[in-house]
Amino acid sequence: MTRVAAVGDIHMGPDSQGTLRPAFETLPGCADVLLLAGDLTRHGTPEEAQVVAREIKDLGVPVVAVLGNHDHHDDHPDEVTAILRDAGAHVLEGEATVVTHGGLRIGVAGTKGFGGGFVGRCAGEFGEPVMKEFVRYSRRRADGLRAALEELRGRECDARIALTHFAPVPDTLAGEPPEIYPFLGSYLLAEAIDTVGADLAVHGHAHAGTEHGMTAAGVRVRNVAQPVIGRAFHVYSLAAH
């Protein structure tokens, strides 16, 4: 059994240093990996990233993360990524990693993802250049997730997980205003997951959404935005392959 701890949208700043560390220090007793589903900072500043880094350093379990839209706001995503990696986190963008803990091999494919909406109510590559680029950017993020999942398919893993910030399905957005669904996720992410396969898909971003969802092919989707799960993290158990 693989135990996956996950949380997103922790939005840390200087005044929140130490608030999650006591809970995170319990992870070795209850989880095999910690997934961070983006929006780890408030504005994406290096100073805020340092706060997150101190919160996750030397936890005793592997930490895998993707960035969110807040982590890009200050236009320093590369520096934020470097700071988190220096703290030991695997920060993914169109990449895959296999981490080990207690003899288990856990594969994670990650991307921030992007918006665009869902089948029947989604943006298309038509019209102004800026609109075309919006959709193409979302497609590139989904293509990166697909490639990362394909890489995992060729590696020995006890569990394979898709980690994003934006939502792959509308199910987990229930509770959010329907008008903003196109800015909360994209069906392209679910297409990537279903094309290759995964044991679990984890995302954040939708603070007023719902925890449980599923892709068309039956992959479980979990919205782990902290306002949704209401705790420092939630643990999901996956049967070993």
Image (tube, grey):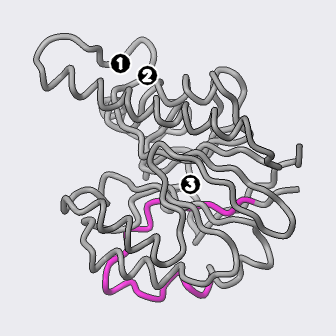
Mark on residue 122? 1
Mark 2, residue position: 118
Binning the other alpha carbons within 10 Å of mark 2 as few (below 14), some (14 to 19) or many (20 upward) gives many
- Residue drawn at x 31%, y 52% is 69
- Quarter of the image for residue 101 reads bottom right
The answer to if 17 sits in the magenta stretch is yes
Quote the CA–CA distance across marks 3 and 1: 24 Å
Residue 90: x %, y % from top left:
54, 63
- Indicate the amino acid at tag 2: Phe
Taking 139 as reference, is 34 left or right? right
Judge left or right: residue 45 versus residue 105.
left
Q: Indicate left or right for 67 with 8 as reference.
A: left
Q: CA distance from mark 2 to mark 3?
A: 20 Å
From the top left corner, tell me how far across and down residue 163 is, in percent.
56, 47
**Residue 215 shows up from this direction:** yes
Label of residue 224 in the image? 3
- Among numbered discs 3 and 1, the one appearing first in the sequence: 1
Query: Does 16 lie within the magenta span?
Result: yes
- The foreground one among 154 and 132 is 154
- Magenta region: 4-23
